Amino acid sequence: GAVVSQHPSRVICKSGTSVKIECRSLDFQATTMFWYRQFPKQSLMLMATSNEGSKATYEQGVEKDKFLINHASLTLSTLTVTSAHPEDSSFYICSARDASGGENEQFFGPGTRLTVL
Amino acid sequence: GENVEQHPSTLSVQEGDSAVIKCTYSDSASNYFPWYKQELGKGPQLIIDIRSNVGEKKDQRIAVTLNKTAKHFSLHITETQPEDSAVYFCAGGFKGGGNKLTFGTGTQLKVEL
């Protein structure tokens, strides 16, 4: 149980284009999903908290107009990187909190490798 | 906000030996401490967690200890195997913080044959 999927697993795009990443909880409902960014050999940095049916909460220093988050259902959250630039190249990982389980348990997706040329 | 420090950054052990990774946290309100294993190119996988109402938890070869007074917690892996080689992250969080987790900097564990 507690499986989280991400799509796509890898994407290469040109500078200036927008990229959408999907995060799905496959076997549980997730009222809260989290989006992280991880640069090579570094830790996970929380970008934003995505709540179903409401606006996402962004961490300090993360541009909400650049990283658009939509959490339209209890099993799907999307992250859109708008007008992507090479510095946005990173490993993007989502996690979902199982509302029916422990208060804090987060289960992570497999990640999406974004490369902006 | 919460700050989680993790040591060591790299750890090399012989197969069959034990490995210990230590973390400290700053916010006394934190009450949930998970450990994640991340293999190259993959997302983190929850391997064990502990809540502040217990001091130790064990799951087969993996154990976690928590010292609330000193605000530190540790991961213990016994009888290490080559497949244990990965990056391990500790994290801390509490419900009042929107269930957010703050991650440590990670430990690259290498189990040598």
Image (cartoon, coloured by chain):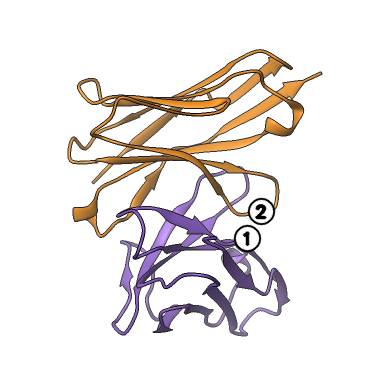
Chain colours: A purple, B orange
Q: Residue at the location (57% across, 62% down)? A: A109
Which residue lies under the disc numbered 1? A110
Task: Please name whichever residue, B58 or A84, is drawn nearer the observer in this view of the structure.
Answer: B58
Graded by Cα atoms within 10 Å as few (under 14), some (14 to 19) or many (20 or more), the crowding at tag 2 reads some
Q: Which mark, residue B41?
A: none
The correct choice, above or below, for A26 with respect to A41 in the image is below
The quadrant of the rendering that contains the C terminus of chain B is top right
Displayed quadrant of residue A72:
bottom left
Residue ranking furthest to the right: B113
Q: Give the left or right position of residue B107, taking residue A54 as reference.
A: right
One can see residue A117 in this view = no
Q: Residue at the location (27% across, 42% down)? A: B2
Q: What SS does tag 1 mark?
A: loop
Tell me which amino acid carries mark 1.
Pro
Instruction: Write down the chain letter for disc 1.
Output: A
Residue B72 on image: x %, y %? 32, 25
Tell me which amino acid carries mark 2.
Lys
Q: Residue at the location (67% across, 19% down)? A: B12
Graded by Cα atoms within 10 Å as few (under 14), some (14 to 19) or many (20 or more), the crowding at tag 1 reads many
Task: Please name whichever residue, A74 or A79, is drawn nearer the observer in this view of the structure.
Answer: A74
Q: Give the left or right position of residue A19, taking residue A58 as reference.
A: right
Which residue lies under the disc numbered 2? B42
For the residues bearing labels 1 and 2, Cβ distance under 8 angstroms? yes
Task: Please name whichever residue, A25 or A49, is drawn nearer the observer in this view of the structure.
Answer: A25
Q: CA distance from mark 1 to mark 2?
A: 5 Å
